[in-house]
Amino acid sequence: MQDQFSLKDKVALITGGTYGIGMAMAQALGKAGATITFNARSEDKVREAELECRALGLDAYGYTCDVTVESQVRLMVSDISQKHGDIDILVNNAGIIKRIPALEMSVEDFNEVINVDLTGPFIVSKAVAPGMIRKGGGKIINICSMMSELGRETVTAYAAAKGGLKMLTKNLACEWAEYNIQVNGIGPGYIATPQTAALREEGNPFNDFIMAKTPAARWGTPEDLEGPTVFLASKASDFINGHILYVDGGILAYIGKQPK
Ligand code: NAP
Ligand code: GCO
C-alpha cells in the first residue's frame, strides 16, 4: 500500500501555503515524499514558511506571488518547471473571506473575493496544466468549503466563489480527464486557522453554534486535512474525477441538534 500513497519524485505547488490549512497540506505532501513549492503575497511569511518546512527536513521552495495576477503566476510556474521539473500536484488553496451583509457589500469587495477564490484557481490551473499534459498526467485539488453547499448571513461573495469552485472542479475534471489529470476538491468544515480566528473569540456565540452543528463536536484542525490531501494527490485516487471530499466532522450529514 505504501506505493499507492507515495509522492516520491513528485513536484507539488500549494497556493497560499504560508500558514493555516495550506501550510499543513504542503507539509503533508512533503512528508509523503514530494518536493514542495508554495506561494503567498507576503514575502516575509514566504521566507518564514520556507525555513519552517526545511527545519522539518522537507525540500521546500517559497514564491512571492499573487494568484490573481496571471503574469506573476506564469513566471512562478515556469521557474518551478525549470528548477524542479513540471508540477505533478497542484493544490488551489489560497483564499480570502469578507464577512459583510449583502445589502452593504460593495461590488469591489464582492469582486475581490471572486477574484482570489474562484478566478485565482482558474489562472493557476491553466498555467500548470500544460506541464501536467507533457508529463502524462497530474492531480489538481481545489479547496472548497461548507459554503460550496450551504449559505449563511454575511458570506455571499465567499459562497458564490466556493460554489463556483465546486463547479470549476467538476468541469475541469471532465475536460482534462483525457490527459490523465484528476481534478477533485476538498471541502473543509470549520477549521481553526487565522481565517476563522474572529469566529472563535471568547464569548462569540458562533463558537457554540458550530459545536452544535458539528456531530464531531469540535473545530477541525489543519492536520485533519493532511490524509485527504495525500490521498487525492496520490495514485490511490487515480479513478476519482470531479469529486468533492468533505472533511467536516459530519456537518453536511446533520439536520441539527434537537431542542431539549
Ligand atoms: P488563512 O489562514 O487565511 O490562509 C490563507 C493563505 O492564502 C495565506 O497563506 C495567504 O497568504 C494566502 N493568500 C491569500 N490571498 C492570496 C492571493 N491573492 N495570492 C496568493 N496567496 C494568497 O486561510 P485558511 O483558513 O488556511 O484557508 C485556506 C483555504 O481553505 C481558503 O481557500 C479557505 O477559503 C478554505 N477554507 C477554510 C476553512 C476554515 O474553516 N478555515 C474552511 C473551508 C475552506 P498572504 O495573505 O500572505 O497572501
Ligand atoms: C464563515 C467561515 C466559513 C469557513 C469555511 C467553512 O464565516 O462561515 O469563515 O466560510 O471558513 O469555509 O467550510
Image (cartoon, rainbow, N blue to C red):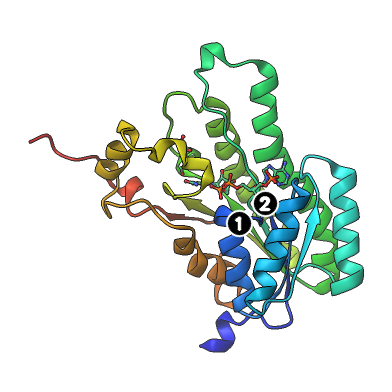
Rate crowding at label 2 as few (under 14), some (14 to 19) or many (20 or more) other CA atoms within 10 Å. Answer: many
Residue 188 — which label? none
The amino acid at mark 2 is: Gly
Q: Which disc is residue 22 wearing?
A: 1
Q: Is residue 238 above or below residue 162?
A: below
Depicted 8 relative to depicted 97: above or below? below
The residue under the point 40% across, 54% down is 220
Q: Position of residue 193 (x, y in %)?
A: 50, 49
Any part of residue 203 in sight: yes
Q: Nearer the viewer, residue 65 or 174?
A: 65
Q: Indicate the amino acid at tag 1.
A: Gly
Do the numbered discs 1 and 2 sit on residues whose CB atoms are within 8 Å? yes
Residue 27 picture location, percent across and down: 61, 69
Q: Is mark 1 within 8 Å of ligand 1?
A: yes
Mark sitting earlier along the chain (1/2): 2
**Residue 235 position by quadrant:** bottom right
Left or right: 105 as drawn, with respect to 179: left
Q: Check the picture and name the quadrant holding the C terminus.
A: top left
Residue positioned 58% across, 16% down in the render:
105
Q: Which mark is residue 16?
A: 2
* In the image, the residue with mark 2 has its CB under 8 Å from the nearest atom of ligand 1: yes
Q: Please, is residue 4 above or below residue 129 in the view?
A: below
Q: Nearer the viewer, residue 146 or 25?
A: 25
